[in-house]
């Protein structure tokens, strides 16, 4: 079986597929990619299904190599990729030969995705390969990737990869508004608190995880 070896794991790198659904009643979150657009872009470039597993990287890229076999891969959400001594653009289909080290450069945002042709062949847990850090299941041994990990790769399907030269960079405008859906607990907050939330400026914090996003900004106080 083919595999890639993690040489340098980056900040927080882990396996994710489309996600694990239907088990919220057990206290298990859906998991899955935090940036589904970039995840789908990387999978599309290598001809994978969105049910296949990819590696999600956080804040920092990783280094890997395929010791014995060539590997076809793509990366979405980074500035550039180095294969050996050659630099290549992201958002295109690339190939590394046996033993060639691949270094994934700076991320353009908080998340980036590495997809390999065929997808990563980690065990399915409750129908998904997604890593759930809270429950310690899925992904690669239920944890983030470490140097020396050997992640198996599935045999590629027989169909050919679509002929993409390079997908366009359609990174959303950072000044675009975010729409809010009013939920059933809105009544727990006074109107002035809701108004503060809708009009004040908030920022994502590093305390965000696969369960949710934690914001910093003016506090929102519930009714007494």
Image (spheres, rainbow, N blue to C red):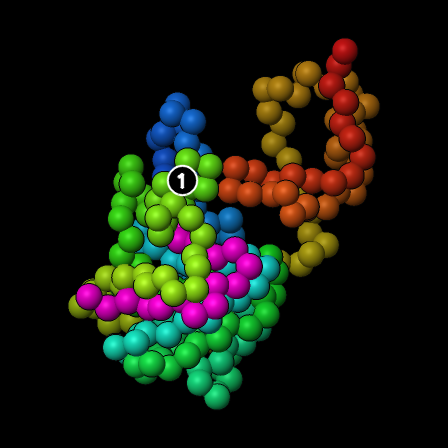
Say which residue label 1 marks: 136
Left or right: 145 as drawn, with respect to 173 = left
Depicted 16 relative to depicted 103: above or below: above
Q: Position of residue 145 (x, y in %)?
A: 43, 57
Pick the front one: 118 or 57: 57
Depicted 76 relative to depicted 190: above or below: below
Q: Position of residue 163 (x, y in %)?
A: 34, 76
Which stretch did the figure color magenta? 1-18
Q: Residue at x 38, y 65 (%)?
A: 148
Q: Secondary structure at mark 1?
A: loop
Among all residues in the image, which is located at the extreme top? 224
Q: Is residue 3 magenta?
A: yes
Quarter of the figure that contains the N terminus = bottom left
> Would residue 170 be seen by someone viewing this image from the given angle?
no
Among all residues in the image, which is located at the extreme front? 148
Left or right: 137 as drawn, with respect to 2 = right
Crowd around label 1: few <14 · some 14–19 · many ≥20 (10 Å): few
Provide the major secondary structure of the magenta segment.
strand
Q: Position of residue 21 (x, y in %)?
A: 36, 35
């Amino acid at each position: 079986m083919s595999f890639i070896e993690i040489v340098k794991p980056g900040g927080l790198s882990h396996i994710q597929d489309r996600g694990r659904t239907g088990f919220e009643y057990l206290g298990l979150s859906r998991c899955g990619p935090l940036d589904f657009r970039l995840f789908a872009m990387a999978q599309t470039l290598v001809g994978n299904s969105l049910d296949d597993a990819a590696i999600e990287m956080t804040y920092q890229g990783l280094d890997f190599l395929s010791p014995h076999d060539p590997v076809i891969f793509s990366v979405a959400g980074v500035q550039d990729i180095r294969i050996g001594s050659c630099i290549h653009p992201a958002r295109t289909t690339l190939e590394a030969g046996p033993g060639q080290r691949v270094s994934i450069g700076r991320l353009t945002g908080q998340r980036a995705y590495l997809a390999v042709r065929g997808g990563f062949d980690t065990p399915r847990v409750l129908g998904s390969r997604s890593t759930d850090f809270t429950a310690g299941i899925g992904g690669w041994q239920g944890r983030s990737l470490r140097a020396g990990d050997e992640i198996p790769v599935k045999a590629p399907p027989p169909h050919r990869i679509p002929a993409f030269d390079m997908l366009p960079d359609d990174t959303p405008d950072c000044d675009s508004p975010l729409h809010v859906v009013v939920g059933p607990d809105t009544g727990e907050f006074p109107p002035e608190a809701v108004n503060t939330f809708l009009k004040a400026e908030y920022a994502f914090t590093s305390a965000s995880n696969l369960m949710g996003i934690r914001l910093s900004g003016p506090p929102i106080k519930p009714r007494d």
